[in-house]
Amino acid sequence: MKTAFIARRLYTPLEEIQNPLLLVEDGKISQVSSRSSKETPANASVVDFGDAVLAPGFLDIHMHGGTGIDLMRASPSDLPRLNKFLTSHGVTGYFATTVAAPLDATCAALGRLADAVEAAAHDNSVQARPLGIHLEGPFLSHKRRGVHPPENLVRPTLEIFDRLWQAARGHVCVLTIAPELEGAMEVIAEATRRKVCVSIGHSDAEMPAAQDAVKAGARHATHTFNAMRPLDHREPGILGEVLSDDRISADIIVDGIHVEPHVVKLFLRAKGRERAVLITDAISATGMPDGRYQLGPIEVDVKDGKCTSGGSLAGSVLTMDRAVRNVTQFSDWSLRDAVRAATLNPALAAGLQGRGALVPGAAADFNVLSPTGEVRKTIVGGLGV
């Protein structure tokens, strides 16, 4: 079956195409062109989205849940509700993210999440899919742990990393680690060898330790500014490395709560359109009313869009479509720039092949956006939600 999708504009996102023709066959993109240069095939069914913008499906590489579902505790029957909610906000793929918990509980959660990732690979339903696992903890700084329980933090060792890796059956795609911890460099090197995206974060590191982590293989940074040693103009610390080193990408929570909008603008200037990545850090409360919710073993109070535990921020209720629109409001970035930070950039950072761009051969996962970035419809595998 061949379907031709047409609209006013399309973001690949490296390129903007006016009056696009997006051809999809068997769940894959077969052609991306302008209607001024290519005719619509006679044997294709045509779907016209009018003045809309076609853009890749959003990828969230750091999220803990939503719709009352906490991914550390979720059962397989819970996930369709969460996945459909994510899709309604433009997300077509995500990394299920852990929090620091007792190792046995973490391994049990990793096994369940591995089941979900493997099942999603054979699932043809029109909804977001877990593409891998982000291991946030247990290798975090006590001083910059945020709300991660201190009793569940451990010194990084190859033995513990391998235990977690085996529990996840090799589906760990991102590892957040504090590089100043004893044993961190060995774990960073081994995780890198296993093609894990090593992300430095939850860290009180001085700049040399962060630089050593990059030399060992780290190539990303976790929720920049949050749970990090503050930037000082004489002792720049981990942030000095994250913001100045063009070899690494970095993600940020653009909800206007975690990072003040003017600092978001500075971050975008520092990392540029090639290396800035949007995440939500969304927890089970996302899409739900104010109240008390779980983040792994942590109880979180949510009021007026702010998630806290013991006075500290504890994740967010941000959705990715809102993050994209916030970028355009907080900075001089265009909608295409913001879309890139939620699609191609996370795909490149995490090594996701065939995702994050509307190009021939890629999965036909894309959003139909209004000219100002609202999600009108989401297409997964060539089929609409």
Image (cartoon, rainbow, N blue to C red):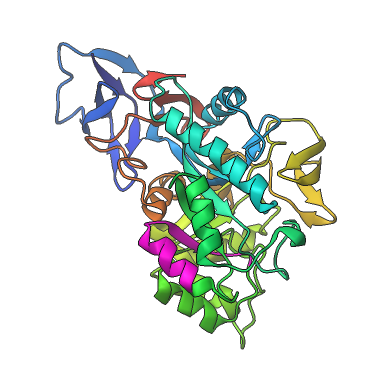
Residue at position x 69%, y 49% in the image: 315
Looking at the picture, how far across and down is residue 234, in whole percent?
61, 88
Task: Give left or right: position of 352 versus 88.
Answer: left
Say which quarter of the image contains residue 39: top left
Is 280 left, or right, of 51 in this rendering?
A: right
**Residue that appears at 68% across and 36% down:** 286
Q: Residue furthest bottom?
A: 234
What segment carries the magenta color? 186-202
The location of residue 48, given as percent across then percent down, is 34, 17
Identify the residue at horizontal 84%, vertical 56% (top origin): 311
Residue 332 visible within the image: no
Q: Say if the magenta span includes residue 191.
A: yes
Vertical placement of residue 95 versus 159, above or below: above
* Image height of 374 relative to 145, above or below: above
Does the magenta portion include 285? no
Relative to the observer, which residue lies in front, 271 or 298?
298
The percent position of residue 207, horizontal first and vertical second, equals: 55, 81
User: 51 or 345, which is in the foreground?
Assistant: 345
Please tell me whether residue 159 is drawn above or below residue 238 in the rendered image: above
Residue 288 position within the rendered picture, expressed as x and y whole percent measured from the top left: 73, 30
Which quarter of the rendering shows the N terminus? top left
Q: Is residue 226 left or right of residue 238?
A: right
**Quick one: 65 or 239, which is closer to the camera?**
65
Residue 260 visible here: yes
**Front residue (pair 195, 364):** 195
Please count the marks in the image: 0
